[in-house]
Image (tube, helix red, strand yellow):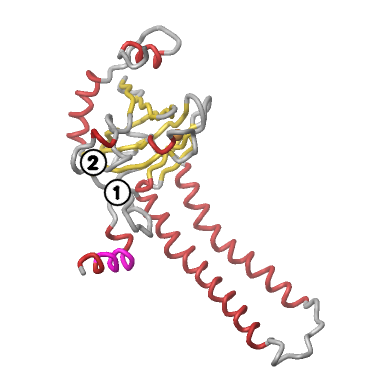
Amino acid sequence: MHKLILLITLIVYPINLFAEQPKDWQLGFQKAASGHMEDLVWFHDYMLLPIITAITVFVLFLVIYACIRYRAARNPVASQTSHNTFIEIIWTLVPCLILIVMAVPSFKLLYEQDEIPPADVTIKAVGYQWYWGYEYPDENIIFDSYMIEDEDLKPGQPRLLTVDNEIVVPVNKVVKVLITANDVLHAWALPSFGVKRDAVPGRINETWFKADRTGTFYGQCSELCGIKHAFMPITVNVVSQEDYDKWLKEAKQKFAKEELGLNNKKVVKRILEGEIK
Ligand SMILES: [Cu+2]
């Protein structure tokens, strides 16, 4: 019985109940944690969905009406009409108008995401086969972020989403993310922040977000990048400014960027750590 009530609640109120990670039976988006995502959810819920529903209902009505009204039994002599200028103008103009109405808020959102305000924190995310590497260029911090295997998960850690080294950012601050890749195409995506950008080798894409509450937020690589594409999650820890400063102090020690003076620092680092033999 409890399960049934939960199921019905989940179906009726999908958006309110979901936290920062995907849930079983989820229908809606993950709960927004940034102004951008709130706008995107608004656009979907109050613009796209009503238009899609209205068009679907209208077309369904036309199909059913035509089936009943013009069935052979009731309409033995079929009409020979093949053109009607008025109706052709209508069915060209109306979809155009609908597209224009949709385009206005859509472009507004796109440009809002594109214009990056002065950043408080800058992060560089580098996609590798198959993990993410992060840098805080202003803080001289560099680290890799690997998924935790099933057998090593601690209670409460979500499967396929937990990583060993999380990104930490302060709440209510503009975080600029520089995104690139080292081997093939990846994509850095975080649904709660409304962020998704391709990671392209040899090119740096930019995006930004401003998290409006603290918590742990999960994302995944969103470009099919190879056999372990599903195993390179993204975890962002949004914390208060004091906690962030504390983390920064520790991270500067733990993840200090080593100037090795060699071409492929990454590989050298991994050899030194005994990962590559
Ligand atoms: Cu990937």
Label 2: how many Cα within 10 Å (few below 14, some 14–19, many 20+): few
Residue 190 screen position, x and y as percent: 38, 43
* Nearer the observer, 241 or 76: 76
The answer to which quarter of the image holds residue 140 is top left
Q: Kindly identify which numbered label has been placed on residue 20.
A: 1
Determine whether, in the image, residue 253 is placed left or right of residue 234. Answer: left
Q: Residue at x 49, y 34 (%)?
A: 225
| Residue 212 drawn in magenta | no
Q: Amino acid at mark 2?
A: Gln
Residue 267 location (% of width, % of height): 40, 15
Tell me where residue 112 appears, x and y as whole percent.
45, 47
Neighbour tally class for label 1: few under 14, some 14-19, many 20 plus, Cα within 10 Å: some
SS of the residue at dot 1?
Answer: loop
Q: From this viewpoint, which residue is outermost toward the top?
A: 261
Span shown in magenta:
6-13
> Residue at image x 33%, y 23%?
138
**Quarter containing ligand 1?**
top left
**Which disc number belongs to residue 157?**
2
